[in-house]
Image (cartoon, helix red, strand yellow):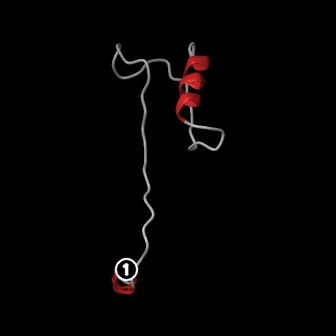
């Protein structure tokens, strides 16, 4: 948290006001003494369903 301003500045270089959601948590010590930051990410890609794909997904959810 000592460099939270730098963290925000760097974030702002890549994302505008509507950038991805983020959560910042202060911890006493990261798992390795040489780490300055730890990042976990999750990605999502939209795609359009074709009728046959939708049928397969419906069958999957019925299991």
Residue at 38% in and 84% down: 62
Whether residue 14 sits left or right of residue 35 in the image: it is right
For mark 1, give the secondary structure.
Answer: helix
In the image, is residue 55 above or below residue 29?
Answer: below
Tell which residue pokes out farthest to the right in this image.
Answer: 17
- Asked which quadrant contains residue 52, the reply is bottom left
Q: Quadrant of the N terminus?
A: top right
* Residue 39 spot, x, y in % from top left: 43, 33
Image mark count: 1
Residue at 34% in and 14% down: 34
In the image, is residue 33 above or below residue 59?
Answer: above
* Residue 54 spot, x, y in % from top left: 40, 82
Observer-nearest residue: 18 or 7? 18
* Residue 28 spot, x, y in % from top left: 49, 18
Q: Quadrant of the C terminus?
A: bottom left
- Asked which quadrant contains residue 33, the reply is top left
Residue at 37% in and 18% down: 35
Observer-nearest residue: 49 or 63? 49
Observer-nearest residue: 57 or 28? 57
Mark 1 Cα shell of 10 Å, populated few (<14), some (14-19), many (≥20): few
* Residue 29 spot, x, y in % from top left: 44, 18
Give the labeled residue for mark 1: 57
Residue at 43% in and 73% down: 48
In the image, is residue 28 above or below residue 18?
Answer: above
């Amino acid at each position: 948290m000592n460099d939270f301003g730098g963290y925000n500045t760097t974030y702002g270089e890549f994302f505008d006001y509507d950038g991805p959601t983020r959560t910042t948590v202060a911890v006493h010590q990261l798992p390795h003494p040489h780490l300055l930051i730890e990042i976990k990410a999750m990605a999502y890609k939209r795609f359009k369903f074709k009728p046959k794909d939708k049928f397969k997904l419906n069958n999957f959810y019925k299991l």
